[in-house]
Amino acid sequence: MTVAPSVASGYDRADWASAFRNVGVELDGVELTASRGTIPPELGGTLYRNGPGRLERGGQWVHHPFDGDGMIAALRFAGGKAVLRNRFVRTEGWLAEEQAGRFVYRGVFGTQKPGGVAANAFDLRLKNIANTHVVRLGDQLLALWEAAEPHALDPDTLETEGISLLGGVLKKGEAFSAHPRFDPGHHGDSRMVTFGVKTGPSSTVRLMEFSCADGRLLSERRDSFKGFAFLHDFAITPNWAVFLQNAVSFNPLPFVLGQKGAAQCLASKPGEAGQFWLVPRAKAKPVLVPAPEGFVFHHLNAFEDGATGELVVDSIFYDDFPSIGPETDFREIDFDTIPAGRLQRCRIDTATAAVAVEVLEERCCEFAMVNPTRQGLDARYAWMAVAGRERGNDPLQAIEKLDLHTGQRHVWSAAPRGFVSEPVMVPRSATGGAAPAEDDGWVLVPVWNGARCASDLVILNASDLSEQAVLELPLAIPYGLHGSWAAH
């Protein structure tokens, strides 16, 4: 059952593509007022967002938006008011290219330095662009990019403090996931659970758990698995860390020879399925389970079903690895040629390795999340970005709330001229000892507004997706990747 009506496809490509631009200004504490509605006075905390903010240098565009330099936006809410601040992450590469006025590094997703193949061949340096996620850990704000170390920022001013090795936990250049999971307290205090992966003919995963309060490393383990691993995300339960090894191969030769970016050297293995790596969070051996066919970037959630004993994993599956070829302009991509994401549930019997698959949402979706207090548990509700039409692939223009128990849906749409990025669900704080309902809170949604060529922040009621407030930002922010909420 869909409670709110769906919106038919009919977007204007020029509106969608107009979001791809450089962020031209850094703002410092600009107070915002709602152009529609009212900011909920109970909403107190900071929404942090990360994403590519520099897509062109010296007249040359990146080949893929994921190669753009990281730019952090922060919206601080208190007493029914909001204040906006944004800063580029001052990485070594950003500083060098700002000074040079051109690209001096190759991009993982295909951006080349000027000078053609000869200038790019055998230059295997990776530019840490810090553009994928931003999270609080202890007193630091971390800008994340999964192929290298995090950058530490001041949580209030967003000034870059430099690369962080997390008190010696990391080595210089060590991979550190850009998609941590936050355990709300399954083992006492809240923890940030994350990983690093070293790939090759065999892949080693380092699982790490940190105290959210002070950033201390609480536990870690390393496990090696056969085969190449492309891992962006994972899921957690109280007892497991769940990884899905996609069935992909990596041929580094075109990268070495300067013909392609490293990510363009990935290819699906037709007819082959991936594999779940189920890593115990305690000291026990991992369990390997065949995965369904398809490619997964993101998981929604996972939980342990006490009634059946199964491990349940909800993930967004694509029929194939979505990619942009070397000759394709990302602003001109044909959405009909790119596989659409579907939300699927895998029920895993860890004793027999049997997997049962159920499709939870056929509509093209991405960036799904549950109430953070239900991370790793049987959550009833999910919030996600979806396409405007119910079948087929299109830009993400709507937010859907899905009841995972009944299938009931609510939909809020930004169409025809609005395009959404990842929603962040903010639960209402408990008051008077009463626990709020699972869907009691707000959903914060960055929206590209094609009508005014700038970004909006939309606040929705998490229960029914009714619009609470629209903040028209004095800033044009390209489509972002991930964000997080930090309560005061």
Image: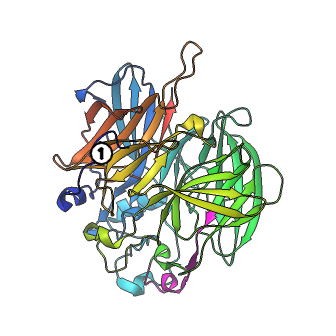
Residue type marked 1: Val
Front residue of 57/308: it is 308
Q: Choose top left, top right, bottom left or bottom right for residue 110.
A: bottom left
In the image: residue 482, left or right of residue 196: left
Residue where numbered disc 1 is placed: 447
In the image: residue 375, left or right of residue 453: right
Q: Give the residue at x 61% y 71%.
A: 274
**Residue lying at the far right of the rendered structure:** 284
Magenta segment boundaries in residue numbering: 244-260
Residue 96 coordinates in the image, percent (x, y): 42, 62
Residue 28 coordinates in the image, percent (x, y): 34, 35
Badge 1 density bin: few <14, some 14–19, many ≥20, Cα 10 Å: many
Q: Secondary structure at mark 1?
A: strand
Asked if 128 appears above or below 465 in the picture, the reply is below
Q: Is residue 1 magenta?
A: no
Asked if 419 appears above or below 183 in the picture, the reply is below
Q: Give the residue at x 32% y 62%.
A: 55
